[in-house]
Image (tube, rainbow, N blue to C red):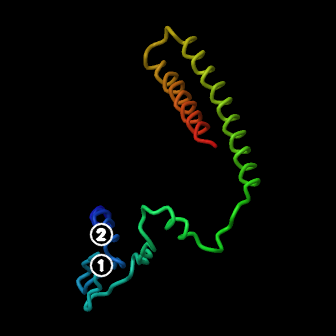
Amino acid sequence: MKILLLAVTFLLPLTGLASTLYKCTDAAGVVLYTNQKAGNKNCTVLLQQVPAPAPAAAAGSKHAAAAATPGDFPRVSGSEQKARDSDRRAILDKELANELQHAEKARKALADAGSQPVDKLQPLRDTAALHERNIESLKKEIGNLR
């Protein structure tokens, strides 16, 4: 079983090059994973990839990116987008307020446990650090809003 997992692990990166991955078993019961179907072996398809469509224009062109959008792609009106942005800002502000409260509680718990052994303090430090990272991420996300 370990050899099977090892073989699949090494063959998966090759599936990007091949469109199909086969599991072939010969008459002696030897299993082979390959991208080429062997004629004299019992082969089953494990993975079949559909090739990605070729890009229509150069990737650096802004006009090409706009033209690549399908005509039936749903459009959102400006007022609806503003309402969505407003809702998003409200949600992020609420999450930030919650994280600030949790961070304050974590800092207080850490200060109250000041004389305990280091192994008891580490989970409190980790919790406080987690809330600080969350606060920074939320502030960054809010800063990215229009």
Confirm or deny contact between disc 1 and disc 2 (CB under 8 A).
yes
Q: Report whether 25 appears left or right of 59.
A: left
Q: Is residue 36 above or below residue 107?
A: below
Q: Nearer the viewer, residue 33 or 62?
A: 62
Q: Which residue is mark 2?
A: 14
Q: Which residue is mark 1?
A: 35
Q: Report whether 80 appears left or right of 32.
A: right
Mark 2 crowdedness (10 Å alpha carbons): few <14, some 14-19, many ≥20: some
Q: Nearer the viewer, residue 126 or 84?
A: 84
Q: Position of residue 10 (x, y in %)?
A: 28, 64
Looking at the rendering, in which quadrant would you find the C terminus? Answer: top right
Q: Nearer the viewer, residue 66 or 117?
A: 66
Q: Is residue 72 above or below residue 38?
A: above
Residue 67 sits in quarter: bottom right
Q: Nearer the viewer, residue 65 or 11?
A: 65
Q: Report whether 28 appears left or right of 19.
A: left
Residue drawn at (45%, 63%), measured in percent from left and top? 61
Q: Position of residue 57 (x, y in %)?
A: 44, 71
Sequence-wise, the earlier of marks 1 and 2 is 2
Looking at the rendering, in which quadrant would you find the N terminus? Answer: bottom left
Task: Give amino acid for label 1.
Answer: Asn
Task: Give amino acid for label 2.
Answer: Leu
